Amino acid sequence: MEETQRGQGGQSRVERLRDSILSGPIIKTLFALGWPVMLANAFEILYNLVDTYWLGKIGKEAVAAPTVGFPILFLLISVAGGFSIAGVSLVSQHTGAGTSKQADEAAGQVIAFMLIAATLVSLLGELIARPLLAGPIGAPPAVLPKAVAYIRVIFAGLPFMFTFFAFRALMRGVGDMITPMMVTGGSIVINMVLDPILIFGWLNIPALGVSGAAIATVFSRALASAVAFYLFFSGRLGIELKLSYFIPKMRWVKQIVRIGGPASIGQAGTALGAVILVSLISRLGVVVVSAYGIGQRLIRFVNLMVWGLASPLTTMIGQNIGAQQTKRAETIAKRSILTAFAIMTALGGLVFLLRRPLFRIFIDDPAVVEQGSRFLAIFIFSIPFFGLFALASAVFRGSGHTRPPMVMALIRLLGLRVGVSYLLAFPLGLGADGLWIGLAISNLLGGFLAVGWLARGSWKERTIEEEKERGEEEEEVEDLKDVGPV
């Protein structure tokens, strides 16, 4: 009775979502769950583009600062952020299995784990930011002070950011994509309003430049985190937290580490590859770095479709595997991957045709526009194969089998992307073109690798550990007494 009464409005909504995921039309359900994720990601990308637009008014060094700083941030946050994947997997599988109380407890354990990890990563990041930027990254001298200022502010706000990341992941685990979209949208609007105020010193506030952009990000994420905690504890959502759920329990910690550990290693490998790649790009000067930074932001618009389908795909796979509907999970995986590939091909062609006008929106430096246009011309046609890679990885993660995506990510980023890009750019002397070709090859081969591994079918087994309630165990004992000895 307690389980039924708990958050009745939110519970009924979760049940409706669960019914659609377990028995509704596949593609219709995928897009119904996916459009809020796409819109939320569009908000994020819009913020990044607005951020780039305002920083571009200062100069190409300001645009380059977040570009060279982000890989270090990504490297360290990925260690903690990978554990949000454990949250999606555990919550979605328990929701599919009908064990909602365990989904609640798993959510609390994941948030506590991520907060501890984020605090440690924040302290580490403050210490190593400048040495990494000046050393391995090789940030250009004109960019280094701005990059250090930006990344140190971001590191200080990591606990807020990770609470927000956990909130989005856990809500997607139960199939609620709309609430994270609304919270994300609100935080992005605040971020966008604060950006020019803090960067240029409007309203009698001192001009903070690149640091102002970072402060706007941290402040908006802190507000979003406060809203997330309120919603979790209010009982209005499909997940209802209690303070006792934040006390670490070994059985949950083991599951989080088993599922989230490989995901974290895979993401850390991806981030490490990005760090090395940016260090290679930095050797070629500010123009190439700026072109890559703006180009990546434009490519994220194309990737909206990938991430918009990957998130609900993870949820749908998790809940169907949790409900032991293996055949339906197989059909969901095949149809989703084919749909994403077709759409990404069309979007990639559109960006190719509009590449120069798109670059001119953000910067009027002819050299940057020309280099960025060449980057997109070479790279954009590999994007559909990145879609194959991302959605195949989402299938593995939804079922809790995170080791294959880890291995594939390390091969794609370190073996293919960094290795081939370096070989073509420097020993073979192709310069920036060699880097862009290497990036495209890594997507192409990574896509084939992911689909081939998925076809082996190792992802179809459940990974959750169910724990019976005490009352259920007592009822089973009483039933056995009535039946007598067997």
Image (cartoon, rainbow, N blue to C red):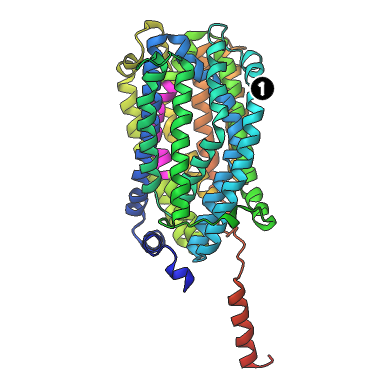
Label 1: element kind: helix
Q: Position of residue 81 (x, y in %)?
A: 57, 39
Position of 483 with respect to 174 (left or right) is: right
- Main structural element of the magenta stretch: helix, strand or loop? helix
Report if residue 164 lies within the magenta region: no
From the image, tell me which residue sits under label 1: 128
For residue 82, say whether it is visible. Answer: yes
Residue 377 to residue 464: above or below: above
Image quadrant where one finds the C terminus: bottom right
The image quarter in which residue 413 lies: top right
For residue 313, say whether it is visible. Answer: no
Q: Label 1 neighbourhood size at 10 Å, few (<14), some (14-19), many (20+)?
A: few
Q: Residue at x 56, y 58 (%)?
A: 105
Q: Position of residue 485 (x, y in %)?
A: 69, 92
Q: Position of residue 312 (x, y in %)?
A: 42, 49
Q: Nearer the viewer, residue 475 or 297?
A: 475
Q: Nearer the viewer, residue 274 or 252?
A: 252
Report if residue 296 lies within the magenta region: yes
The three-letter amino acid code for the residue at tag 1 is Ile
Q: Please tell me how many numbered marks the rendered image carries.
A: 1
* Residue sitting farthest toward the front: 204
Position of 135 with respect to 395 (left or right) is: right
The image quarter in which residue 40 lies: top left
Q: Where is residue 56 in the image (x, y as percent from the top left)?
A: 39, 13
- The stretch in magenta equals 295-309
Residue 16 to residue 51: above or below: below
Q: Nearer the viewer, residue 285 or 248?
A: 248
